[in-house]
Image (tube, helix red, strand yellow):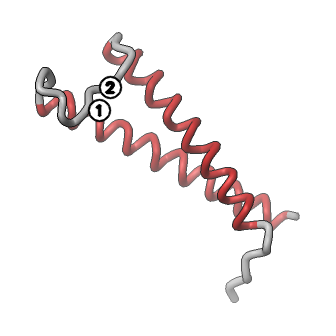
């Protein structure tokens, strides 16, 4: 039987999502800096960058954001259920 989410789940999930997004952005920036030595990842419209670099940056950023989102969503759901 599926339990109905508590009233706390939405506001906590929203706050956790914002914090997770900030953390994911920071983590991506740090990983990109470690991998390339550059402070900023390439923009998709940057004519100075090649396809490989742009797509690699996008894939890394997507993977980090997905991992952080799943972690935050799961931790929030478990925490609210324990309450």
Residue 56 horizontal/vertical position (percent): 24, 33
Q: Nearer the viewer, residue 72 or 8?
A: 8
Residue 81, placed above or below residue 35? below
Residue 53, placed above or below residue 39? below
The answer to whether the residues at label 1 and label 2 have Cβ atoms under 8 Å apart is yes
Q: Secondary structure at mark 2?
A: loop
Q: Residue at x 29, y 32 (%)?
A: 57
Q: Residue at x 18, y 28 (%)?
A: 46
Residue 37 horizontal/vertical position (percent): 35, 10
- Give the residue furthest to the top: 37
Q: Which residue is mark 1?
A: 57
Q: Quadrant of residue 29?
A: top left
Residue 67 horizontal/vertical position (percent): 49, 47
Q: Which mark is residue 76?
A: none
- Local crowd at mark 2 within 10 Å, few (<14), some, or many (≥20)? some
Residue 77, placed above or below residue 18? below
Q: Quadrant of the C terminus?
A: bottom right
Q: Quadrant of the N terminus?
A: bottom right
Q: Secondary structure at mark 1?
A: helix
Of label 1 and label 2, which has the lower sequence position? 2
Q: Which residue is mark 2?
A: 41
**Label 1, label 2: how far apart the Cα atoms are:** 6 Å
* 70 displayed left or right of 53: right
Q: Nearer the viewer, residue 73 or 8?
A: 8
Residue 24 horizontal/vertical position (percent): 52, 38
Q: Nearer the viewer, residue 41 or 47?
A: 47
Camera-near label (1 vs 2) is 2
* 32 displayed left or right of 54: right
Q: Quadrant of residue 33?
A: top left
Q: Residue at x 73, y 76 (%)?
A: 5
């Amino acid at each position: 039987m599926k339990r109905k989410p508590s009233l706390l789940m939405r506001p906590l999930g929203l706050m956790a999502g914002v914090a997770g997004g900030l953390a994911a952005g920071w983590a991506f920036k740090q990983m990109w800096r470690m991998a390339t030595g550059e402070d900023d990842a390439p923009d998709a419209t940057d004519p100075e960058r090649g396809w490989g670099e742009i797509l690699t940056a996008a894939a890394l950023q997507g993977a980090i954001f997905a991992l952080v989102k799943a972690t935050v969503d799961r931790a929030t759901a478990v925490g609210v259920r324990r309450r």
